[in-house]
Amino acid sequence: MSRAGGEIPRAVRVRVGGRVQGVGYRYFALRSAEACGVTGFVRNLDDGSVEVKARGDREALESFLDTLRIGPRTGRVMEFDVQELEDPEAFHGFGVRY
């Protein structure tokens, strides 16, 4: 069911570990979010992992998460932890944070 049909947008926080920094993962996530129609942001964390917060309808989020699990060809996703956000903030577009 689409948003027009009344579906409430969902939001998730994802922590991605492995070889995900210095390989274009953030820009891969940006392009994937735009293609899937989700909003949110991606950023590198100090521990070498990447954090993604995303919001969208169920189908868009599932497609986005499937893409993030694969990652860019130059990277290697070894850890993938998804948490549903209870009280998500609203995002306008999808961006890379530094």
Image: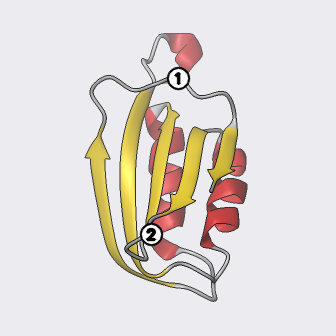
Q: Residues within 10 Å of mark 2 (few under 14, many from 20)?
A: some
Dot 2 or dot 1: first in sequence order is 2
Indicate the secondary structure of the residue bearing disc 1: loop
Image quarter of residue 32: bottom right
Q: Residue at x 44, y 69 (%)?
A: 69
Image quarter of residue 29: bottom right
Indicate the secondary structure of the residue bearing disc 2: helix
Q: What label does residue 56 carry, if any?
A: none
Please determine whether, in this image, residue 45 is positioned above or below residue 48. above
The amino acid marked with disc number 2 is: Arg
Q: How is the image coloured?
A: secondary structure
The amino acid marked with disc number 1 is: Ala
Q: In this figure, what is the number of numbered marks? A: 2
Please determine whether, in this image, residue 33 is positioned above or below residue 45. above
Q: Residue at x 56, y 85 (%)?
A: 75
Where residue 50 appears, x then y in whole percent?
46, 66
Q: Would you say 88 lies left or right of 56 here?
A: left
* Quadrant of the image containing the C terminus: bottom right
Q: Residue at x 71, y 49 (%)?
A: 35
Q: Would you say 87 lies left or right of 46 here?
A: left
Location of mark 1 (residue)? 90
Location of mark 2 (residue)? 69
Please determine whether, in this image, residue 44 is positioned above or below residue 58. below
Where residue 7 appears, x then y in whole percent?
44, 18
Q: Would you say 9 lies left or right of 3 here?
A: left
Q: Nearer the viewer, residue 62 or 22?
A: 22
